[in-house]
Image: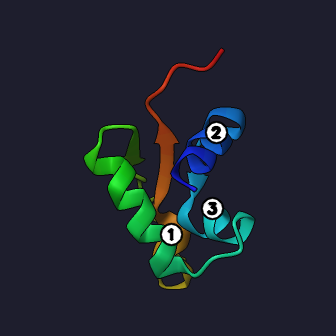
Amino acid sequence: MLSEILGLLKERGAMSLKELALHFQTEIPAMEGMLDTLLSKGRIEKLNTKCSNCKGCIEVKPEDAAIFRTLEKTD
């Protein structure tokens, strides 16, 4: 599954934790574990999101704000 995650991120670009979990039809905690493995191996990175001060932060869930992208070059 790790190679499929990398392939999807190469194909589509940056994606949220929630988007990845939905795509692979898996629970958020399971996807977090797989992403942690890829992070520790230096295959992906977690992007820092900046707040726009829109006062909607209480509505943003952590799985929507956690954005990941591959560190591998795209073809």
Residue 61 visible in this rendered orientation of the protein = no
Q: Earlier in the sequence, mark 2 or mark 1?
A: 2
In terms of secondary structure, where does tag 3 sit?
helix
Q: Quadrant of residue 23?
A: bottom right
Please state which amino acid type lies under the numbered disc 3. Leu
Alpha-carbon span between mark 2 and mark 1? 15 Å
Rendering coords of residue 71 (x, y %): 43, 30
Alpha-carbon span between mark 2 and mark 3? 12 Å
Q: Which residue is mark 2?
A: 7
Please state which amino acid type lies under the numbered disc 1. Met
Q: Which residue is mark 1?
A: 31
Color style of the picture = rainbow
Rendering coords of residue 11 (x, y %): 71, 34
On screen, residue 19 versus residue 53, left or right, reads: right
At 29% from the left and 42% from the top, the residue drawn is 41
At 42% from the left and 53% from the top, the residue drawn is 49
